[in-house]
C-alpha cells in the first residue's frame, strides 16, 4: 500500500530549518530533539564506560591513574543517570506519543515543554563542561557523598548545579504530563481505557514531581557548604553525614522507578501487539504502577545499610524493599501470561521485550540479595551491586528504550529498517551485555570492591571477560544504531499500521501530521488492547 | 499559539465574598495570638509545647488552604492531591525519626 | 499552527484551559512544598539531636518582630484573595488596589526581615563571622538553618511580588478580566504558599519553648 506522504503535510515537512526545530513547540519535534541529544550523551557515557573497562582489563595501571579513574566513573554515572536513563523513555517516547495515544494534538503546556528541553541542554552542557573546566571533573562518584564532596578541589559545584537544572527539566516534564493526562484524553477514554504506557507515564510523572525537589534542596546544601565553609553535614559542628545520604536517596531511590516504570509501560505496549491479543491483567498492571510509585518512596535506606543507621531503621527499610518487589513481580507474571497462546510475531521489538523480561527479572532477583540485611553486609559496595543495577537499568530500561525505538521508528519516520540486521545486532548486543555484566555478579561474590581502579590477581579473568564483553556490546550497539539510521533514511515506506496494533497512534499516518490526526481517533470498543476483531 | 476556543469547565462558580475573607483572616490572627501566648506564658510544658505549636500551625495552614486557596470549593481531586503530598511528607518525617531516635 | 489536514480535534492541547492552568500551578506548589520540606526534615533531625542548643539559640530571635511578620503575611494573603473576588466581580480598579496592597505588605515583611538579619550580622552571628564560630555545634546548626530557611523564603517572597507585579500590569491592560483571571488565581496560590511556609517557620524558629 502506498503511503499518504505525498497527499498531506507531515510534521517534518511543516516548517524547515534549525530554528524551526529548536524553537518548536510541537511535542513531536521536542521528542525528537530529546532523542538526538539523549543518544549523543548516551554514546558519551558508553565511551566513558569503555574507558573504565579498558583500565580494568588487567590489574595495575592500564591507561589511567587512580584520580582519573575516579573522575571517569563519576562522569559515567552522572551522564548515564541524569542525561540518559532518567529522561530517556518519558522525554523521547512520552513526549512524542503521550498526546497521540490519548487522542489529542499536543500536551497541555507546549511552551513549558520546550523549556524543559532547553533546561536539559543547559544542564548537559554544564555537566560536560565540568569535565573540561580546569581539567578537574568531579571525583566523588555520582552520589556526591559528604564529607568528600564538600572538601575535594574538583568541579563538584558545577556538576551539582548541572544536576539541579536537569532536575527542573524533569519536574516540568512530569507536571506537563500529569495535566495532559487529566485534561486532554479523547472523549470516551476514561482512565481505565488508557493504554498502559500512559498509566506508566502518569505514575512516573508523580515521582518526578515529588521526589526531584528533595535532591534539589540537598544539592543546594552541598553548594552552600562548599561556599560558606561550614555546613549542615559536618560532624565537627554536630552535623550528620548520614543525613546527607538519607536526603540523597529519598530522591535517588524513587529515581530508579522513574527509570523503570516507563520501561514497564513500553513492554506492556509491545507484548499485546506482538502476540496479537489483549494484555493479561490490565487493571493489575495499571494499579501496580501506582503501588510501585508509592512504596518506592519508602525503601531508600537499603542503599545505606552499612552507613550507621539504627537497627530499627535498617529492619524497616529491608521489609519495605521486599514489599516493593511484589507489584513488580505481578507485572512480570502478567506479561508472560499475555504471551501465552498468543499469535506470536517475532520481530525486533519483541526480541527486546523478551530480553527485558529476562534481564530485568535477573537483575531484580539479585536485588533481593541486597535487600536482605545479612547478605547486604557482604555485598555492599562490591561489584555485585554494579552488576545488579546494570542488569535492571541497562538490561531493563536500556533494552526497553531500544525496543521502543524499533517499535516506533516506522511510525515516526514512515520507513522500516532492515529486520535481519536488526535481529543480528540484537543478538550481538544481548551476548555482549551478558559477557560484560554477569562476571560482575561473580566478582562481587568473590569480594571485589567497586570504584577501585585496581584489583587483586584472582579477579583477573572475570574482569577480562567483562572487558571483552564491553567490546562485543559496543559492536552490537553501533550495528543497531547504524541499521536504524539507514532505515530512517532509505528504508521501505510503511503505512499507518505495519505491526497491526490497535493503539491510537497506529490510526494516524506515518509520519503523523502536525496536529497528529487527520480524522477523529476511534477507541477500541472492548478496551485499549481489544484484538478480538483483528 | 493559543486558540480562543475555551474549554467548557473552568473556574468553579463559587465566589468568596470579601466578608468571607475577613472572617478567615480574623480566625488566623486569633490562632497566631494563641500560639504566641502559649509559647510565652505556657512555661514548663516540655515536649507538649512542640506538639501544640505544630498543631496550631497545621490548623492555620488548613484554614489558608481551604478558604484562601479555595480548596473547599474546588474539585475534590485537588484536596486528595494535597492530602497525598502532605501524607508523604509526614511519612518521611516518621521514617527519619525512627532512625534517629533509635541510634 | 498549521492544520495541514484541515481537521481540528475538540480536545486540543492548544485551547485556553483555565482548569489546566490551575492544576499546573498546584502541581508546581507541590514541588515547592517538597523543596522546603527537605529543609524542614533537616531541621527536625537536628532539633531532635540538639534540643537544648536550639532552644538557647532561638532566644536571639525577636518574637515581637516574628509575630508582626506573621500577621503581615496573613493580611497579605487576605488582600490577594480579595483581589480575586474583585476581578471575578469585574471590579478591575479594586483588584489592582488590592494587588498593590499585597506587594506593599510584602515589602513591610522584607524590611522587618532586613532589620532582623542585620541585627544578627552586627552581632557577628552569621556563618563565617566571629561570634558564630564561637557557638556550640547545636547553636551553629540552628543559625545556619535559620539563615538558609528564612533566606530561601525571602527569595520566594521576592519572586511572588514580581509575579503579582505582572498580574497588575496585565489587569491594567485588560488582558485579565472577569472571564479570564487564571493568572490572578495562580499568583494567589503561589502567594498563599509563601504564607504557608512562614506559618511553619515562625513557631519552629521563634517559638521554641
Image (cartoon, coloured by chain):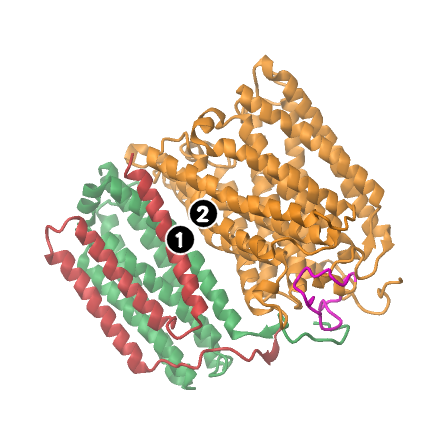
Chain colours: A orange, B red, C green
Q: Is residue C196 above or below residue A274?
A: below
> Does the magenta-highlighted stretch encompass residue A519?
yes
Label 2 close to label 1 by CB (< 8 Å): yes
Asked if one can make out residue A423 in the rendered structure from this viewpoint, the answer is: yes
Picture quarter with the N terminus of chain A: bottom right
| Residue extending farthest right | A2
Asked which secondary structure carries label 2, the reply is helix
* Pointer 1 local density, CA inside 10 Å: few below 14, some 14–19, many at least 20: some
Residue C104 belongs to the span the image colors magenta: no
Helix, strand or loop for the magenta stretch, by majority:
loop
Q: Position of residue A430 (x, y in %)?
A: 72, 35
Mark 2 to mark 1 CA distance (whole Å): 8 Å
Tell me the quarter of the picture where residue A53 sits: top right
Mark 2 lies on residue: A297
At which x and y percent is residue A51? 65, 28
Q: Measured from the top left, where is residue A73 in percent x and y?
A: 57, 31
- Which residue is at a point 27% across and 74% down the rendered structure image? B24
Q: Which mark is residue B88?
A: 1
Seen from the viewer's position, the closer of residues A243 and C140 is: A243
Horizontally, is A1 left or right of A100 in the view? Answer: right
Q: Which residues, given as a range, are shown in magenta?
A: A510-534
Would you call the spot at circle 2 few (<14 residues within 10 Å), some (14-19), or many (20 or more)? Answer: many
The local secondary structure at tag 1 comes to helix
Q: Residue furthest bottom?
A: C90
- The image quadrant that residue C115 belongs to is bottom left
Q: Chain of mark 1?
A: B
Q: Residue at x 57, y 57 (%)?
A: A283
Mark count = 2
Extreme residue toward the front, this view: A341
Amino acid at each position: 500500500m502506498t503511503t499518504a506522504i505525498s497527499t498531506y503535510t507531515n510534521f517534518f515537512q511543516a516548517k524547515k530549518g534549525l530554528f524551526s526545530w529548536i524553537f518548536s513547540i510541537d511535542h513531536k519535534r521536542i521528542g525528537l530533539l530529546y532523542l538526538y541529544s539523549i543518544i549523543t550523551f548516551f554514546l558519551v557515557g558508553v565511551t566513558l564506560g569503555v574507558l573504565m573497562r579498558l583500565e580494568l582489563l588487567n590489574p595495575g595501571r592500564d591507561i589511567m591513574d587512580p584520580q582519573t579513574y575516579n573522575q571517569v566513573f563519576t562522569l559515567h554515572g552522572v551522564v548515564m543517570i541524569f542525561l540518559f536513563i532518567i529522561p530517556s523513555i518519558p522525554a523521547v517516547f512520552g513526549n512524542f506519543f503521550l498526546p497521540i495515544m490519548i487522542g489529542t494534538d499536543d500536551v497541555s503546556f507546549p511552551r513549558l515543554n520546550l523549556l524543559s528541553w532547553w533546561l536539559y541542554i543547559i544542564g548537559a552542557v554544564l555537566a560536560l563542561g565540568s569535565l573540561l573546566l580546569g581539567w578537574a571533573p568531579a571525583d566523588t562518584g555520582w552520589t556526591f557523598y559528604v564529607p568528600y564532596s564538600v572538601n575535594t578541589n574538583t568541579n563538584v559545584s558545577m556538576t551539582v548545579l548541572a544536576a539541579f537544572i536537569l532536575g527542573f527539566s524533569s519536574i516540568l516534564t512530569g507536571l506537563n504530563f500529569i495535566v495532559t493526562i487529566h485534561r486532554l484524553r479523547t472523549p470516551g477514554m476514561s482512565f481505565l481505557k488508557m493504554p498502559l504506557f500512559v498509566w506508566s507515564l502518569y505514575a512516573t510523572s508523580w515521582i518526578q514531581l515529588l521526589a526531584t525537589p528533595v535532591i534539589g534542596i540537598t544539592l543546594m546544601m552541598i553548594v552552600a557548604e562548599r561556599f560558606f565553609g561550614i555546613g549542615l553535614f559536618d560532624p565537627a559542628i554536630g552535623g550528620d553525614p548520614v543525613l546527607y545520604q538519607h536526603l540523597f536517596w529519598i530522591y535517588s531511590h524513587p529515581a530508579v522507578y522513574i527509570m523503570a516504570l516507563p520501561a514497564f509501560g513500553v513492554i506492556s505496549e509491545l507484548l499485546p501487539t506482538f502476540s496479537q491479543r489483549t494484555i493479561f491483567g490490565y487493571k493489575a498492571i495499571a494499579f501496580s504502577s501506582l503501588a510501585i510509585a508509592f512504596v518506592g518512596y519508602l525503601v531508600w535506606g537499603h542503599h545505606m545499610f552499612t552507613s550507621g543507621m539504627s537497627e530499627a531503621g535498617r529492619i524497616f527499610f529491608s521489609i519495605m524493599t521486599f514489599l516493593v518487589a511484589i507489584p513488580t513481580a505481578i507485572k512480570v507474571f502478567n506479561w508472560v501470561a499475555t504471551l501465552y497462546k498468543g499469535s506470536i510475531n517475532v520481530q525486533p521489538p519483541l526480541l527486546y521485550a523478551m530480553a527485558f523480561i529476562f534481564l530485568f527479572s535477573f537483575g531484580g532477583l539479585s536485588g533481593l540479595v541486597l535487600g536482605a540485611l545479612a547478605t547486604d553486609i557482604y555485598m555492599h559496595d562490591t561489584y555485585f551491586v554494579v552488576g545488579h543495577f546494570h542488569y535492571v537499568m541497562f538490561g531493563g530500561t536500556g533494552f526497553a528504550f531500544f525496543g521502543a525505538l524499533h517499535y516506533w521508528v516506522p511510525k515516526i519516520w514512515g520507513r522500516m529498517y532492515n529486520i535481519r540486521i536488526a535481529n543480528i545486532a540484537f543478538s550481538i548486543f544481548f551476548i555482549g551485555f551478558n559477557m560484560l555484566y554477569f562476571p560482575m555478579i561473580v566478582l562481587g561474590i568473590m569480594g571485589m570492591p567497586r570504584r577501585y581502579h585496581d584489583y587483586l590477581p584472582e579477579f583477573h579473568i572475570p574482569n577480562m571477560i567483562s572487558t571483552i564483553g564491553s567490546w562485543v556490546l559496543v559492536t552490537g550497539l553501533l550495528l543497531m544504531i547504524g541499521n536504524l539510521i539507514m532505515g530512517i533514511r532509505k528504508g521501505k515506506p510503511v503505512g499507518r499500521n505495519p505491526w497491526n496494533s490497535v493503539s491510537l497512534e497506529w490510526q494516524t499516518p506515518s509520519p503523523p501530521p502536525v496536529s497528529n490526526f487527520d480524522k477523529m481517533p476511534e477507541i477500541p470498543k472492548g478496551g485499549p488492547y481489544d484484538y478480538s476483531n483483528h | 499559539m493559543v486558540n480562543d476556543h475555551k474549554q467548557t469547565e473552568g473556574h468553579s462558580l463559587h465566589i468568596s465574598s470579601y466578608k468571607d475573607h475577613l472572617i478567615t483572616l480574623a480566625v488566623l490572627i486569633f490562632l497566631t495570638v494563641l500560639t504566641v501566648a502559649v509559647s510565652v506564658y505556657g512555661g514548663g510544658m516540655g515536649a507538649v509545647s512542640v506538639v501544640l505549636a505544630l498543631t496550631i500551625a497545621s490548623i492555620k495552614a488548613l484554614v489558608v488552604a481551604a478558604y484562601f486557596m479555595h480548596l473547599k470549593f474546588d474539585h475534590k481531586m485537588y484536596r486528595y492531591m494535597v492530602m497525598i503530598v502532605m501524607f508523604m511528607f509526614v511519612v518521611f518525617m516518621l521514617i527519619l525519626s525512627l532512625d534517629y531516635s533509635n541510634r | 499552527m498549521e492544520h495541514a489536514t484541515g481537521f481540528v480535534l475538540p480536545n486540543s492541547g492548544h485551547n485556553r484551559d483555565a482548569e489546566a492552568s490551575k492544576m499546573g500551578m498546584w502541581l508546581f506548589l507541590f514541588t515547592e512544598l517538597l523543596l522546603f520540606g527537605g529543609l524542614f526534615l533537616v531541621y527536625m533531625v537536628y532539633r531532635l539531636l540538639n534540643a537544648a542548643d536550639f532552644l538557647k539559640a532561638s532566644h536571639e530571635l525577636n518574637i515581637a518582630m516574628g509575630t508582626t511578620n506573621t500577621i503581615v503575611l496573613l493580611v497579605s494573603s487576605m488582600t490577594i484573595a480579595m483581589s480575586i473576588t474583585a476581578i471575578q466581580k469585574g471590579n478591575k480598579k479594586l483588584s489592582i488596589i488590592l494587588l498593590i496592597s499585597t506587594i506593599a505588605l510584602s515589602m513591610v515583611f522584607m524590611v522587618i526581615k532586613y532589620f532582623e538579619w542585620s541585627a544578627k550580622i552586627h552581632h557577628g552571628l552569621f556563618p563565617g563571622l566571629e561570634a558564630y564560630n564561637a557557638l556550640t555545634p547545636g547553636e551553629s546548626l540552628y543559625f545556619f538553618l535559620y539563615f538558609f530557611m528564612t533566606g530561601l523564603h525571602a527569595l520566594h517572597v521576592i519572586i511572588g511580588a514580581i509575579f503579582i507585579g505582572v498580574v497588575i500590569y496585565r489587569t491594567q491592560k485588560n488582558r485579565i478580566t472577569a472571564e479570564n483571571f487564571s493568572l490572578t488565581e495562580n499568583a494567589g496560590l503561589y502567594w498563599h504558599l509563601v504564607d504557608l511556609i512562614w506559618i511553619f517557620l515562625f513557631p519552629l524558629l521563634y517559638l521554641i519553648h
